[in-house]
Image: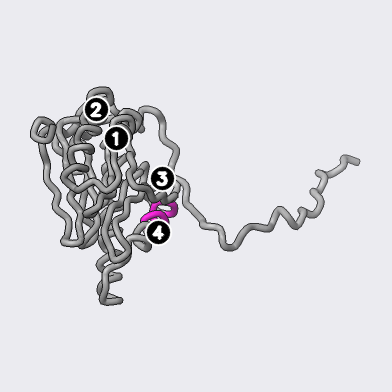
Amino acid sequence: MTPGPELSGPQAADEFQSDPYAPEVGELPEQSAQDTEKVNKTGTTTIGISTSEGVVIATDMRASLGGRFVSNKNVQKVEQIHPTAALTLVGSVGGAQSFIRTLRAEVNLYEARRGEDISMKALSTLAGNFARGGPFFAINPILGGVDDDGHHVYSIDPAGGVMKDDYTVTGSGLTVAYGTLEDRYEEDMTNEEAKEVAAASINAAAERDTGSGNGIYLADVTADGVDINGYDFDELL
């Protein structure tokens, strides 16, 4: 008599247990190295600085394919998403643009429902939640804004972590930019002083990082609103 297949014993209870409150995040399809190289990325160096007057956000203007080919020389990588706040684009262009559109919609809904602007703390938390659970591929933005509680700069990592600081840098040129920024940064700088420091830091990164360059966009954020303009490096340095 041929013995039949052995039946597995009962599974331990631990195998069925999971945290009902844990976030459930969908998986992105696997990508080959060739697919990754074809993604249009901003590469980039972006900087956020909290000042005595508000916040200054600076970015370079270059977009590249896989960090090897410059696909666009005039990309605006900082956008207004709130009456007194702006967000940078870092990572894949499509993911960053989708992220900004989603946040703008939520900010508008909050204002319509509550009759007041969302606070920077709440907006940063919302941005972190979207980054962690949403379909936004390879983003690492900076959020800078002004509200009744003061002037705020946050970096948001791809896993949804939110870190507040007096200044921060993200993007492929961050290691070079940080050196210049930390050397020149001073507490209680004005927005004009912070613009010069940010421009010098972006310029330093552009000298060594192939994903950064071609000029600079500056967002001047105060309680009066957000003003975004593009410049050549020699206009600021």
Tell me: residue 181, above or below residue 157: above
Q: Earlier in the sequence, mark 1 or mark 3?
A: 3
Depth order, front residue of 233/213:
233
Q: Which residue is mark 1?
A: 181
Q: Earlier in the sequence, mark 2 or mark 1?
A: 1
Q: Nearer the viewer, mark 3 or mark 2?
A: 2
Q: Nearer the viewer, mark 4 or mark 3?
A: 4
Would you call the spot at circle 1 few (<14 residues within 10 Å), some (14-19), or many (20 or more)?
A: many
Q: Is residue 223 visible?
A: yes
Secondary structure of the magenta portion, mostly?
helix
Q: Position of residue 15 (x, y in %)?
A: 71, 53
Tell me: residue 128, above or below residue 237: below
Q: Position of residue 188 (x, y in %)?
A: 27, 48
Q: Is residue 40 visible?
A: no
Q: Nearer the viewer, mark 4 or mark 1?
A: 1
Q: Which residues are magenta?
A: 127-133
SS for callout 1:
helix
Q: Which residue is mark 4?
A: 125
Would you call the spot at circle 3 few (<14 residues within 10 Å), some (14-19), or many (20 or more)?
A: some
Q: Earlier in the sequence, mark 3 or mark 2?
A: 3
In the image, residue 28 lies in the stretch drawn in magenta: no
Q: Which residue is mark 3?
A: 158
Q: Nearer the viewer, mark 2 or mark 1?
A: 1
Residue under the image location 26 percent in, 25 percent down: 210
Residue under the image location 30 percent in, 67 percent down: 118
Q: Amino acid at mark 4?
A: Thr
Q: Amino acid at mark 3?
A: Pro
